[in-house]
Image (cartoon, helix red, strand yellow):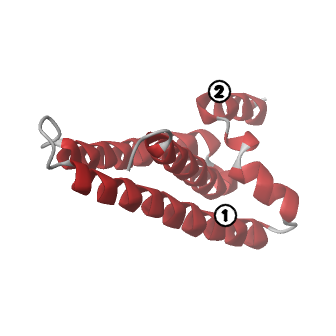
Amino acid sequence: MKAAVASVLLLAAGGAEAGALAECRGATRTPAELMACLQSARRQAGDRMLESFLAIEQRLGRLEVAPGRERSLAALKQSQRDFERYLRAHCQVMQWLASGAAAGPAALGCDVDQLRARAAALDGLAVDQPN
């Protein structure tokens, strides 16, 4: 019963089973393979998010000379710090909800999902915007 409640809470808290955790569970057979898959996905998602952040940062650097945009880089950097705090807190909750042997994979899966979402959000900032 406790495992069923934890699974429901995990799904409600961020859909961990619908993202990276489910992807890696479907592609692996052992706990070690699961962790390796999630760690690889974490690196890829982190790199992708950083790439998106740097592209927006570069773009804002060019635009910041325009009146009214003087604080755009500072706002982007604050947004990133806020995201990083959220990522740590949110995924720690996921880890606590999973507990035991599932805690590590739950936290990593959460990281991957949130980093992917952040990259998509940053990419969305550049959509339909002039260079």
User: Does residue 122 appear left or right of residue 102 in this picture?
Assistant: left
- Dot 2 crowding, Cα within 10 Å, few <14, some 14–19, many 20+: few
The front one of 49 and 83 is 49
**Kind of residue indicated by mark 2:** Ala
Residue 13 percent location from the top left of the image: 59, 31
The front one of 65 and 73 is 65
> Which secondary structure, mark 2?
helix
Residue 38 percent location from the top left of the image: 66, 63
Q: Residue at x 69, y 32 (%)?
A: 11
Residue linked to disc 1: 38
Q: Quadrant of residue 23?
A: bottom right
Query: Contact, CB < 8 Å: mark 2 with mark 1?
Result: no
Residue 108 percent location from the top left of the image: 59, 57
* Disc 2 to disc 1, C-alpha distance: 21 Å
Q: Residue at x 65, y 56 (%)?
A: 105
2 is higher (above) or lower (below) than 127: above
46 is higher (above) or lower (below) than 96: below
- Dot 1 crowding, Cα within 10 Å, few <14, some 14–19, many 20+: many
Q: Quadrant of the N terminus?
A: top right
**Kind of residue indicated by mark 1:** Leu
Q: Residue furthest front?
A: 130
Residue linked to disc 2: 12
User: Does residue 97 appear left or right of residue 128 in this picture?
Assistant: right
The front one of 1 and 85 is 85
